[in-house]
Amino acid sequence: MGTTSNDPVVRSYAKAPARTITADGVTYAYRELGPKGRIPVIFFVHLAATLDNWDPRIIDPIAKEHHVIAFDNRGVGASTGQVPDSVEAMADDAYTFIRALGFDKVDIFSFSLGGFIAQALVVKHPELVRKLVLTGTGPAGGKDIDKVAGTTYYDILRATLTRSDPKEFLFFNRNATGKPAARAFVNRLKERTVDRDAPITVKALQTQLKAIKKWGRSAPADLSKITEPTLIANGDNDRMVPSVLSEDLHRRIPGSELIIFPDSGHGGIFQFHDKFAPIAVQFLDR
């Protein structure tokens, strides 16, 4: 459905309309906001996440002037089909989704597993991507990526025992700055009250973890081929995708920019959203 000129533009992720599009037998769930006309920014979400897991304090500032689309990959949330067991197949699905919407040039904002998928996509379809934002992520074959599953299961257990959200453990330091930042982040994810997404299934999570393990054990890709302007960001103490891997990406992607936030973990960009969102907007606008 096209919006007519007298429709107000939705700039709040909490109010973004839930939409679907079907391609190659898969119905993809997505949300769309921001003014149309410029190159859209496609958001690639993290492990175990659905559309409900994007921080509005990251999306909303970008959606002020940019057409933003967040989506559930195959088998995730309200999207149909089975989760693929490789990052490359997930990238193929993302490509199918983007092309089904009719775009031949996009910017990508990715986090964690989304960053693996974004790298696989840009290596295979460099012509599709104008700019790339890689946060909380690392390269194929990156040190200790294959240990993500162990860390994830351990923290899900810790969270269950304390009746908290696993992301409070996985994304944030358990210290005086990390704990309040974690709670604030988890609360922001509840700002959308209508049209919430379907939760991820245990089977989908397990398949994603299998794909991540494969990615961690696979041969490194030639990232020097990535000529698109690239912004890389993480916290300095990422337990999920070790922070050194962001430095590794920065070394290997020519001309990339790197921001490491102090005293923060995997969710550094969410802890420092007030600093990071303007940097991301500036990068996309440049």
Image (spheres, helix red, strand yellow):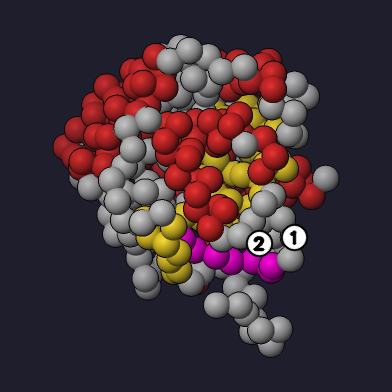
Q: Measured along the vertical axis of the image, is residue 25 above or below residue 34?
A: above
Residue at the spot x=43%, y=66% of the render? 20
Which quadrant of the figure contains the C terminus? Answer: top right
Q: Where residue 141 sits: x, y (%)? A: 47, 14
Q: Amino acid at mark 1?
A: Arg
Q: Is residue 32 magenta?
A: yes
Q: Is residue 70 left or right of residue 151?
A: right
Q: Which span of residues is magenta-colored?
A: 30-36
Q: Is residue 7 magenta?
A: no
Residue at the spot x=49%, y=46% of the render? 94
Q: Where residue 145 sits: x, y (%)? A: 41, 19
Q: Are marks 1 and 2 in contact (CB under 8 Å)?
A: yes
Q: Amino acid at mark 2?
A: His
Q: Is residue 245 left or right of residue 194?
A: right
Residue at the spot x=45%, y=24% of the render? 241
Label annotation for residue 38: 1
Q: Secondary structure at mark 1?
A: loop
